[in-house]
Image: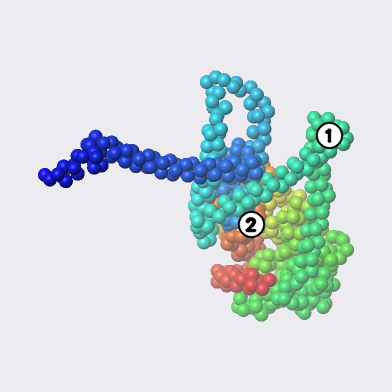
């Protein structure tokens, strides 16, 4: 070892270090590195805490802005789940979102009331100390976490329930021959529901702000004590709201609706051309002028099949069918309108035809094309159809505003026609038949006191999709033979009246069916038929019995819920294929065959007519 090596290895003077010093230096180095690592970790943790703090702060500000009721959210979620439960009609995601949003908004209100009642009466009685004190008085952190969990559970739970509902929708769509919806597409209903809830709550809070402003005004300016001012203002606002909605606003709404639909009533489809044949009202020879018939009346008289078309379908010589119609503007009063129809029947020599059908229309004056054409093809045009208009409004609005109009119009028309018909020799007058669909069936039912009156006055009746409020229909349903279901009842062994959704249904029971015959066509899935206020608190028989062929097996009765669900179904009862809901299609041909089958009826003729009816309705959809 050289001197230099010795100096390099151990000399202090030369700046060397002893082993102890060297070890100390290494310790200081590693300690510095550790402190640096801890500082880095601390910085990351600090950054994470900063992000969480910001999120927490944002959540606090959002809560302060929205001021939600968490019990309200929980009850809203429950109401949302109820609103997507199985019902009679399949629903598109947009419509389901609106229905669920309204339902959730109602649930939110119920939850708020429950929260208020709890805080008012139960909360003051809860002790601040004891075993359960921490449960009722949680920390700020626990309270915040609970709120977040509630929101997440409501949002995620709504999505899961919608996914399950999409499966129910697909099952129902398959039963009705529709294209199944997708789960991903159906989940869009949640966003629509959320926007609907926000809108409803926003309107409510605006009203609440107005009430509070009035209370302050009464308290400060009128010197009214607050405990008196608040209930007084609430009562005044509530009374005004009821009066407005039942009186001024309701009348204003129906006046506006009437005005809007009367404008529509004045429109004419380009495909509806004024007839020149004298067998039609609205022709130059008619006393019921073309421009007074209304939109539906002009379509009705303009689109009747010609004798040539009937011959083409039946393969037999045909007559020009007679279609008589009077609109709201065709005469001054309902009595004059009914008398004008009789004059039109006189003018067209309708009394010489084999069949005369008196139709009570729906609200706008609509007559179902397939129903009218069925009887025209069956009898080779040797018939006449008479109808009137009693309202500008669609059936739903007409039902809400004044359902008696339909009954009064039906009674006037049927009695006016029968009065003239009864004066003719029995061997030289047409069969007198009555037809009504939906609200129209209620109108024509009003012309009779019961089955005996029907058998005395007319030769047959076809009623389609009768509302649950129909008087005669309700009596027959309630008195049906024991053991027969509500959706397909048998009354008095089917001797006079029969109910059905298909021709096979009408063939039961296999016992004599005397003339005149009464037929009710009703689908198990038709909400028009099964909707009733009784659904609120009473389980109907049709939900106790086996479900119909096009009704989901998953549907159950729940108080209030089922009423709301079927009420929502009313809005789109016809948005399904024929043979389901309130869409009866060519089933009306089967009804007419059972009520008034012509002598030369055969299977080939029936098939030809059914094919022609399908062709004609497709043309109507494309041109009306």
* Residue 142's disc number: none
Residue 388 position, x and y percent, is: 78, 64
Q: Residue at x 64, y 70 (%)?
A: 621
**Quarter occupied by residue 228:** top right
Task: Look at 74% across and 55% down and name the residue there.
Answer: 397
User: On the rendered image, what quadrant is the C terminus found in?
Assistant: bottom right
Few, some or many C-alpha atoms within 10 Å of disc 1 (few <14, some 14-19, many ≥20)? Answer: some
Residue sitting at 59 percent across and 62 percent down? 578
Q: Secondary structure at mark 2?
A: loop
Q: Quadrant of residue 574?
A: bottom right
Q: Residues within 10 Å of mark 2 (few under 14, many from 20)?
A: some
Q: Is residue 349 above or below residue 547?
A: below
* 619 up-or-down from 66: above or below: below
Any part of residue 63 in sight: yes
51 vs 117, left or right, is left
Numbered tag placed on residue 219 in the rendering: 1
Q: Which mark is residue 572?
A: 2
- Front-lying residue, 253 or 592: 253
In this view, the residue farthest toward the left is 1
Q: Quadrant of residue 137?
A: top right
Quick one: 181 or 411, which is closer to the camera?
181
Residue 491 placement (x, y as % from top left): 63, 48
Foreground residue, 375 or 355? 375
Point out the tag, 1 or 2, that comes first from the N-terminus.
1
Whether 229 is drawn above or below 528: the answer is above
Spatial separation of the CA atoms under disc 1 and disc 2: 49 Å
Q: Is residue 129 above or below residue 143?
A: above
Q: Residue at x 79, y 37 (%)?
A: 234
Image position, residue 222 (x, y; %): 88, 35
């Amino acid at each position: 070892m050289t001197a230099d090596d010795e100096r390099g290895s151990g000399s202090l003077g030369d700046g060397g270090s002893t082993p102890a010093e060297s070890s100390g230096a290494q310790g200081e180095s590693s300690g510095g590195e550790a402190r640096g690592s801890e500082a880095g970790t601390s910085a990351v943790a600090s950054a994470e805490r900063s992000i969480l703090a910001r999120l927490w702060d944002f959540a606090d500000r959002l809560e302060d802005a929205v001021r939600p009721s968490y019990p309200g959210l929980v009850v809203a979620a429950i109401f949302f789940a109820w609103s997507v439960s199985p019902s009679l009609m399949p629903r598109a995601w947009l419509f389901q979102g609106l229905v669920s949003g309204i339902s959730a908004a109602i649930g939110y209100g119920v939850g708020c009331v429950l929260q208020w009642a709890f805080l008012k009466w139960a909360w003051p009685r809860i002790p601040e100390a004891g075993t359960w004190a921490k449960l009722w008085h949680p920390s700020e952190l626990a309270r915040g976490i609970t709120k977040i969990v509630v929101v997440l559970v409501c949002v995620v739970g709504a999505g899961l329930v919608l996914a399950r509902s999409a499966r129910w929708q697909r099952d129902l769509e398959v039963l009705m021959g529709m294209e199944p919806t997708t789960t991903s597409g159906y989940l869009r209903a949640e966003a629509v529901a959320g926007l609907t809830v926000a809108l409803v709550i926003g309107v409510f809070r605006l009203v609440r702000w107005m009430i509070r402003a009035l209370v302050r005004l009464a308290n400060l300016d009128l010197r009214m004590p607050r405990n008196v001012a608040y209930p007084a203002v609430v009562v005044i606002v509530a009374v005004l709201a009821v009066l407005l909605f039942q009186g001024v606003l309701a009348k204003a709404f129906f006046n506006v609706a009437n005005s809007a639909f009367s404008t529509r009533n004045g429109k004419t489809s380009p495909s509806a051309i004024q007839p020149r044949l004298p067998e039609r009202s609205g022709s130059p020879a008619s006393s019921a002028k073309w421009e007074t018939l209304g939109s539906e009346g002009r379509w009705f008289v303009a689109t009747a099949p010609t004798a040539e078309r009937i011959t083409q379908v039946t393969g037999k010589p045909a007559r020009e069918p007679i279609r008589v119609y009077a609109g709201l503007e065709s005469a001054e009063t309902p009595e004059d309108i009914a008398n004008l129809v009789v004059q039109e029947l006189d003018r067209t020599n309708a009394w010489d035809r084999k069949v005369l059908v008196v139709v009570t229309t729906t609200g706008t004056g609509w007559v179902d094309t397939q129903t009218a054409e069925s009887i025209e093809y069956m009898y080779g045009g040797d018939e006449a159809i008479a109808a009137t208009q009693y309202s500008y409004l669609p059936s739903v609005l007409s039902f809400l505003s004044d359902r008696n109009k339909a009954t009064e119009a039906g009674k006037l028309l049927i009695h006016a026609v029968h009065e003239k018909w009864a004066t003719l020799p029995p061997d030289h007058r047409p069969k007198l038949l009555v037809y009504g669909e939906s609200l129209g069936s209620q109108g024509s039912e009003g012309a009779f006191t019961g089955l005996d009156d029907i058998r005395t006055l007319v030769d047959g009746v076809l009623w389609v999709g009768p509302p649950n409020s129909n008087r005669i229909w309700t009596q027959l349903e309630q008195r049906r033979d024991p053991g027969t279901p509500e959706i397909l009842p048998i009354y008095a062994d089917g001797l006079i009246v029969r109910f059905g959704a298909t021709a096979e249904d009408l063939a039961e029971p296999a016992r004599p069916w005397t003339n005149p015959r009464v037929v009710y066509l009703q689908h198990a899935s038709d909400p028009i038929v099964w909707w009733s206020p009784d659904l609120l608190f009473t389980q109907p028989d049709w939900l106790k019995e086996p479900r119909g062929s096009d009704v989901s097996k998953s549907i159950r009765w729940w108080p209030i819920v089922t009423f709301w669900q079927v009420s929502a179904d009313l809005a789109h009862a016809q948005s399904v294929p024929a043979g389901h809901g309130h869409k009866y299609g060519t089933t009306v041909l089967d009804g007419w065959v059972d009520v008034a089958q012509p002598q030369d009826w055969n299977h080939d003729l029936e098939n030809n007519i059914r094919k022609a009816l399908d062709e004609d309705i497709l043309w109507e959809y494309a041109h009306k």
